[in-house]
């Protein structure tokens, strides 16, 4: 089973930036897709972005397009989420997830590993 450890959260003002990191270790076979999600009003969770760590393809939900960029460093087994132009509504605990597909990661259904989360707080 793959273990995921997030870092990089913090407190910023509106318009600020943060880069979240998710370091993966353990048995990653079959969990090539990694991504980020956060709780959302009226939903259990909201997928933000995902990446195929094998092929490099990325997928973003509407809330992330244009402001968030997911990337990876295979040498470090780490996935990043660069967030710019942050808004107060981006305030949340951000969780890293790993699974067998973009859909699994972004929907949360079929996710095989979760991280503990890293808090992002954006003040106005």
Image (cartoon, grey):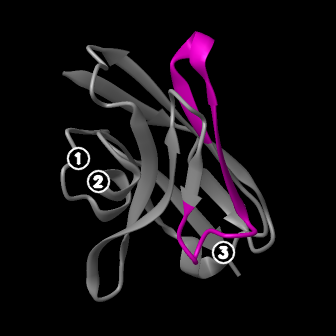
Q: Given the current orientation, which residue lies at the most extreme front position? A: 55
* Residue located 23% across and 47% down the image: 111
The quarter of the image holding the N terminus is top left
Residue at 67 percent of width and 70 percent of height:
65
Position of 50 relative to 73 (above/below): below
Ranked by sequence position, the earlier of labels 1 and 2 is 2
Is residue 108 rendered to the left or right of residue 16?
Answer: left
* Residue designated by label 3: 123
What distance separates the C-alpha of mark 2 from that of mark 3? 31 Å
- Residue 47's spot in the image, x, y percent? 41, 64
In the displayed structure image, the side of residue 42 where residue 73 appears, left or right: right
Q: Residue at x 77, y 61 (%)?
A: 84
Q: What stretch is highlighted in magenta?
A: 60-80
Quadrant into which the C terminus falls: bottom right
User: Tag 2's secondary structure?
Assistant: helix
Pick the residue in front: 15 or 50.
Answer: 50
Query: Could you tell which of marks 3 and 1 lies nearer the N-terminus?
Result: 1
Residue designated by label 1: 111
- For mark 1, give the secondary structure: loop
Using the numbered discs, state the Cα–Cα distance from disc 3 to disc 1 in whole angstroms: 31 Å
Q: How many marks?
A: 3
Which of 46/51 is in front? 51
Residue 91, percent from left and from top: 53, 70
Q: Quadrant of residue 78?
A: top right
Is-magenta flag for residue 78? yes
x%, y% of residue 82? Answer: 69, 49
Marks 1 and 3: in contact by CB < 8 Å? no
Above or below, comparing residue 92 to residue 8 in the picture: below
Q: Do the residues labelled 1 and 2 touch (CB within 8 Å)?
A: yes
Element type where label 3 sits in the image: strand
Q: Are marks 2 and 3 in contact (CB under 8 Å)?
A: no
């Amino acid at each position: 089973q793959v273990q995921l450890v997030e870092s990089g959260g913090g407190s910023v003002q509106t318009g600020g930036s943060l880069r979240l990191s998710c370091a993966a270790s353990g048995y990653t076979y079959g969990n090539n897709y990694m991504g980020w999600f956060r709780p959302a009003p009226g939903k259990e969770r909201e997928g933000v972005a995902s990446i195929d760590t094998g092929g490099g393809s990325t997928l973003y939900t509407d809330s992330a397009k244009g402001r968030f960029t997911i990337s990876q460093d295979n040498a470090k087994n780490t996935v990043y989420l660069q967030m710019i132009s942050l808004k107060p509504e981006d305030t949340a605990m951000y969780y890293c997830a790993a699974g067998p597909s973009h859909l699994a990661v972004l929907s949360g259904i079929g996710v095989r590993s979760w991280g503990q989360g890293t808090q992002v707080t954006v003040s106005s």
